[in-house]
Image: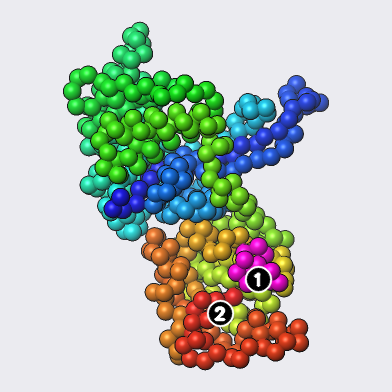
């Protein structure tokens, strides 16, 4: 693969709530589900990207996320799985689908987010990404990403093979896609094929109709446990039978099929070979237990996003609200991050300087677990609750968002600040923005990384050592001091 697999489409936050039912509601004859566990995961295009990343592929996801806690959670889950997130602005709310389950059966599905909204314009970096892809998978869930004009133009222009997984409420595939992958109901609805013929004849007519209408190279209609029917050059379709007759939860099987086909095409497989590989992968996926068994360990273990830390300006929801308000007014969003263990004058100077660069300042704060992983088991000295409250009390800070990962990349992919600020030392040349690890993330939406002067002589580590009666380390000078400041920033 010469470039990443690029997945384009609508991402939803899926939650499976498991529980037990042993009584009826006293005020209505409906069962009461006592929750015992729940699992969050990316749905839609996000699930397809997750499947591809689990196969070891380099994966980038172009999707739309709103400024809400669900969007923050999705960014965290996807980043944990190794997916690079290129998020377009999404008005309204990030869509959520909640399945209430008991004994392996779905009792009810609760949807949030309302109708799809038009996502914002993609940055030039997104269009370059599509042009340089080894393959592109469009995972359309009918919520607007696949309709975005600039994205459609880039998809039509790319030389990479394009797999289009359609939705009846979505747009037509761009002309010339390599492979379209509707399931049976989608093919019938999209082509309005009359009923009365055999199953294979109906699928073949639907596939041929879509291939001609969309000028697609090939169309594979998935047939559930019976495999798939491929219509490509010539009048005789190819039927690919499933290698195993699997029964179980089929949620996500279509995404597994489409991602497997796209990965095969990226490696140079023929379309017929890609469809055979996709049928085998989707069948094995269902046989192994479906989405619950297929989730990577990183996604299963990803901690929930902190919604509130004890104040109205703390948590993902608070940060998203501030960012949305500033963006709606055409303002500039500024963010910075760090551990901020024992808040001192150096921290305050950096935060004040950062706030002057825009219309709001969001602080991305390392959680207690994150600080311990970075600094050692004896840190932090102050809990994340206390640290977030102190930061939120500063007049220069508009919101605080706690993140659990070693880096703020997931938080940044969701917040999409215009400016990311780190503390640096201009006199020694430290804090070169080109070397900051966050710079690559900011480039995805055209953001800018900058440094601000660091107030010399302040160190949390030395303050802790002094408080413990220990001898502080000898103050570094020159390039060593600059290197430490570049690495630690405002921490």
Assign a secondary structure to mark 2. helix
Q: Magenta stretch?
A: 368-380
User: Between 320 and 155, which is closer to the camera in this rendering?
Assistant: 155
- The front one of 116 and 106 is 106
Q: Is residue 70 above or below residue 177?
A: below
Mark 2 Cα shell of 10 Å, populated few (<14), some (14-19), many (≥20): many
Q: Residue at x 54, y 42 (%)?
A: 295
- Residue labelled with disc 2: 350
Residue carrying label 1: 376
Q: Nearer the viewer, mark 1 or mark 2?
A: 1
Point out which mark residue 2 bears: none
Q: Can residue 233 be seen?
A: yes
In the displayed image of the protein, which residue is found farthest to the right?
Answer: 26
- Using residue 123 as the reference point, say whether residue 422 is left or right of it: right
State the image quarter where residue 168 is shown.
Answer: top left
Q: Is 420 on the left-hand or right-hand side of 338?
A: left
Q: Position of residue 434 (x, y in %)?
A: 39, 74
Q: Is residue 67 above or below residue 155?
A: below
């Amino acid at each position: 693969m010469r470039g990443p697999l690029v997945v384009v489409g609508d991402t939803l936050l899926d939650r499976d709530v498991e529980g037990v039912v042993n009584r009826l509601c006293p005020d209505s004859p409906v069962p009461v589900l006592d929750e015992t566990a729940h699992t969050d995961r990316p749905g839609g295009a996000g699930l397809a990207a997750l499947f591809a990343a689990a196969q070891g592929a380099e994966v980038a996801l172009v999707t739309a996320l709103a400024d809400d806690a669900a969007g923050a959670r999705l960014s965290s889950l996807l980043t944990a799985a190794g997916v690079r997130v290129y998020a377009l602005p999404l008005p309204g709310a990030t869509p959520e689908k909640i399945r209430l389950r008991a004994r392996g059966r779905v009792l009810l599905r609760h949807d949030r987010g309302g109708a799809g909204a038009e996502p914002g314009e993609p940055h030039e970096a997104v269009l370059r990404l599509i042009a340089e892809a080894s393959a592109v998978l469009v995972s359309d869930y009918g919520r607007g990403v696949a309709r975005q004009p600039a994205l459609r133009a880039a998809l039509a222009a790319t030389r990479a093979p394009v797999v289009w997984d359609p939705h009846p409420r979505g747009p037509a595939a761009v002309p010339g896609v390599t492979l379209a992958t509707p399931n049976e109901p989608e093919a019938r609805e999209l082509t309005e094929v009359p009923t009365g013929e055999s199953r294979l004849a109906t699928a073949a007519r639907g596939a041929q109709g879509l291939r001609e209408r969309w000028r697609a190279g090939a169309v594979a209609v998935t047939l559930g446990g019976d495999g798939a029917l491929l219509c490509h050059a010539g009048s005789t379709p190819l039927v690919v039978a499933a290698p195993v007759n699997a029964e179980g939860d089929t949620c996500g099987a279509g995404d597994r099929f489409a991602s497997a086909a796209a990965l095969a095409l990226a490696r140079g497989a023929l379309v017929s070979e890609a469809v055979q590989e996709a049928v085998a992968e989707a069948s094995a996926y269902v046989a192994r237990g479906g989405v619950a068994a297929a989730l990577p360990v990183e996604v299963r273990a990803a901690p929930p996003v902190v919604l509130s830390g004890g104040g109205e300006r703390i948590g993902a929801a608070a940060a998203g609200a501030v960012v949305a308000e500033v963006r709606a007014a055409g303002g500039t969003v500024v963010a910075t991050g760090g551990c901020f263990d024992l808040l001192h004058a150096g921290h305050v100077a950096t935060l004040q300087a950062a706030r002057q660069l825009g219309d709001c300042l969001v602080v991305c704060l390392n959680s207690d677990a994150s600080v311990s992983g970075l600094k050692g088991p004896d840190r932090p000295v102050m809990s994340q609750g206390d640290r977030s409250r102190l930061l939120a009390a500063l007049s220069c800070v508009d919101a605080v968002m706690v993140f659990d990962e070693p880096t703020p990349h997931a938080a940044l992919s969701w917040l999409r600040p215009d400016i990311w600020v780190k503390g640096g030392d201009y006199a020694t040349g430290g804090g070169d923005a080109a070397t900051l690890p966050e710079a690559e993330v900011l480039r995805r939406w055209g953001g800018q990384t900058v440094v601000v002067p660091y107030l010399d002589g302040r160190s949390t580590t030395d303050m802790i050592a002094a408080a413990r009666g220990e001898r502080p380390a000898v103050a570094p000078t020159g390039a060593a001091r600059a290197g430490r400041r570049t690495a630690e920033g405002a921490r």
